[in-house]
Image (tube, coloured by chain):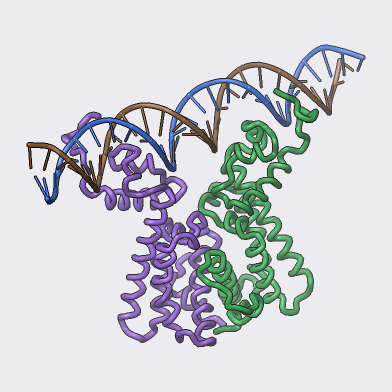
Chain colours: A green, B purple, C brown, D blue
Amino acid sequence: MLALLNAPYHHGDLRNVLLEAALIILARDGAAGLGLRDLARAVGVSPAAPYRHFNSRAALLEALAVTGFQRFTTAMNELAASGPVDRLSAMSRAYVRFALDNAALFRLMFSSELKRDNRPGLRRAADAAFGTLRQVNGGDTATGRIAALSAWTRVHGLVMLLLDGQIALQPGEDIDALISQISDQH
Amino acid sequence: MLALLNAPYHHGDLRNVLLEAALIILARDGAAGLGLRDLARAVGVSPAAPYRHFNSRAALLEALAVTGFQRFTTAMNELAASGPVDRLSAMSRAYVRFALDNAALFRLMFSSELKRDNRPGLRRAADAAFGTLRQVNGGDTATGRIAALSAWTRVHGLVMLLLDGQIALQPGEDIDALISQISDQH
DNA sequence: TGAGCAAGTAAGCAATGTTAGCATTGCTCA
DNA sequence: TGAGCAATGCTAACATTGCTTACTTGCTCA
């Protein structure tokens, strides 16, 4: 084939380049618009090249979801380390912000296309991500579990309904204010 | 083509048969496993036949989601009509039960593959479905809105985390009990 | 009766995921 | 140094999919 601009035969860091490009396409077109051929084209590589790094399209999506969980984890852990004062509400805000800032990625992380059961790597990443969240509310006591679940479900439901357009912020309404209003509600 | 078993040229009620078969395939394989050709095959009709009734695969998914919202609406309205006592908690239980009993359909209803913005029919169905939910909590006052949102987000978040396998019921735990515990939590 | 229309069929196009086999590169070790 | 080898890229092909176009079929009704 033509050697355009002296492009070297070996790309060098194709796996990471693929992942980065995939994140961009994901943010732009959603998971449905992310195909392996398309991705290869975007990176300037042959259609079969990505298969050296991802066994299938599902494997690519899984890898993306894993990096999503990893980023989510670091965001959560940073907050957990920052001090115990209002840690829960800070985590709630961070949870929502992460989801809204990474909408397509967040959806992919919870997508049914990735059956977490058969993917140990994904399950591990998800468990790590929510481990902090599970413990910040009183560990494993029965009441602590309920408290954690209640906070978690509120935030998660809020995020999902916002992402789906079922809920919209009212004009001038602040998302952080809404979060704390909902969280303070009985 | 071969006229298998004297199959008539015209099917008679193809649209509804397609929808029913699609619901079955959806429940079995999820939205990703639902293709038009596959569906046509399952119903015993040529690959192009479904296009007489649905302009595209997306249109079929939209129709499925609309019927999902309709079923959801009737489930909610039955409860709302049944009496004001503990109406909210009854709706919460029905919400969760519907979602768990119709997992794939519920996911499809909130799928990002269907951008609700550009689909007036879908938006109308969704609005109708959640209209009751929006009003049962005190209508459109500011505090009523927050109360409704708080209840709604808890239930929706619970459902989503359950469907995603992030939360699991503990051995012997009752889902209805969990719902009321979470709902009663501050 | 036969014109017209709704609802099927057949055939084919473009795109995709995936695989098989070949080519090139750079690392390792005698 | 240089021979071999594993990693990583490429080309070519296959099966399958969504979708379109153009032809049939059979029902309805003037």
- Residue nearest the viewer, comparing D19 with B181: D19
- Residue nearest the viewer, comparing C25 with A67: C25
Placement of B123 over or under B104, stated as above or below: below
Q: Position of residue B67 (x, y in %)?
A: 35, 61
Q: Position of residue B156 (x, y in %)?
A: 49, 69
Image quarter where the N terminus of chain A lies is top right
Q: Position of residue D16 (x, y in %)?
A: 43, 34
Which residue is pictured at 35% across the width and 66% down the height? B70
Q: Position of residue A92 (x, y in %)?
A: 65, 72
Q: Is residue A172 left or right of residue B138?
A: right
Q: Is residue A82 left or right of residue B17?
A: right
- Residue nearest the viewer, comparing A125 with A13: A13
Placement of A99 over or under A29, stated as above or below: below
Which residue is pictured at 33% across the width and 39% down the height? B41
* Figure label count: 0
Image quarter where the C terminus of chain A lies is bottom right
